C-alpha cells in the first residue's frame, strides 16, 4: 500500500553524467584559481578507473590507517544444532594440524604465516613466511 507521503523511487545514477559534472566543476575551479595552485586544479575527472601510478609512491599517506590484524588457528564448518550444544569444556575440532603454521590476516586477507610463541606470558606469532604481493593478487583474483 502506498502513501502520498512516500518518497518516489530513487532513479539510477548516471555515472557518466556525474563524472562530467565533476569535470566541469574542476575546470571552473581551475579557471577561477588564477594560478594559486589549488589542490583540485589539476585533478582529472573520475571515470571509474583507478588512477595510473605516478612516480611519487608516497606510502606515508596511509601509514596511520588502522587495520585489523588477526591470527587464524584453524577453521571448521558445523551445523547450528552443534553450536547450540556447546558448553564450557567442549572441544571443537579444527581443520589445521598441530604444528602447522598459523595464518596471519590483515582485514581478512592472508599476508603471512607463522608459529605461536610466548613472550613474557603473552602469546605472539613469529612470522615464518610472508606472502609475496604477486601471490596476494593471485589469491584475490580467485575470489
Image: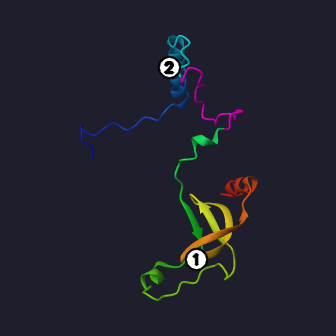
Residue 40: where, in percent of width, then height? 54, 24
Residue 84: where, in percent of width, then height? 42, 82
Region rendered in magenta: 39-57
Viewer can see residue 74: no
Q: Which mark is residue 76?
A: 1
Magenta includes 42?
yes
Q: Residues within 10 Å of mark 2 (few under 14, many from 20)?
A: some
Q: Quadrant of residue 135?
A: bottom right
Compared to residue 139, the image places residue 20 above or below, namely above
Q: Secondary structure at mark 2?
A: helix
Q: Which mark is residue 25?
A: 2
Q: Quadrant of the C terminus?
A: bottom right
Residue 79: where, in percent of width, then height? 50, 79
Of the pair 8 and 99, the residue shown nearer to us: 99
Of the pair 135 and 71, the residue shown nearer to us: 71
On screen, residue 97 versus residue 80, left or right, reads right
On screen, residue 79 versus residue 72, left or right, reads left
Residue drawn 27% across the image and 47% down it = 1
Q: Secondary structure at mark 1?
A: loop
Q: Which mark is residue 138?
A: none
Q: Quadrant of residue 9?
A: top left
Amino acid at each position: 500500500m502506498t502513501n502520498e507521503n512516500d518518497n518516489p523511487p530513487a532513479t539510477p545514477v548516471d555515472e557518466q553524467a556525474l563524472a562530467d559534472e565533476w569535470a566541469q566543476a574542476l575546470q571552473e575551479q581551475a579557471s577561477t584559481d588564477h594560478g594559486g595552485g589549488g589542490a583540485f586544479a589539476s585533478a582529472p575527472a573520475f571515470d571509474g578507473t583507478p588512477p595510473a601510478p605516478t612516480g611519487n609512491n608516497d606510502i606515508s599517506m596511509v601509514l596511520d590507517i588502522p587495520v585489523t590484524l588477526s591470527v587464524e588457528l584453524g577453521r571448521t564448518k558445523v551445523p547450528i544444532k552443534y553450536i547450540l550444544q556447546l558448553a564450557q569444556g567442549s572441544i571443537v575440532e579444527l581443520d589445521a594440524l598441530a604444528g602447522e603454521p598459523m595464518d596471519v590476516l590483515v582485514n581478512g586477507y592472508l599476508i603471512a604465516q607463522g608459529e605461536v610463541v610466548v613472550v613474557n606470558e603473552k602469546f605472539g606469532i613469529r612470522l615464518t613466511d610472508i606472502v609475496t604481493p604477486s601471490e596476494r593478487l593471485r589469491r584475490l583474483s580467485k575470489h
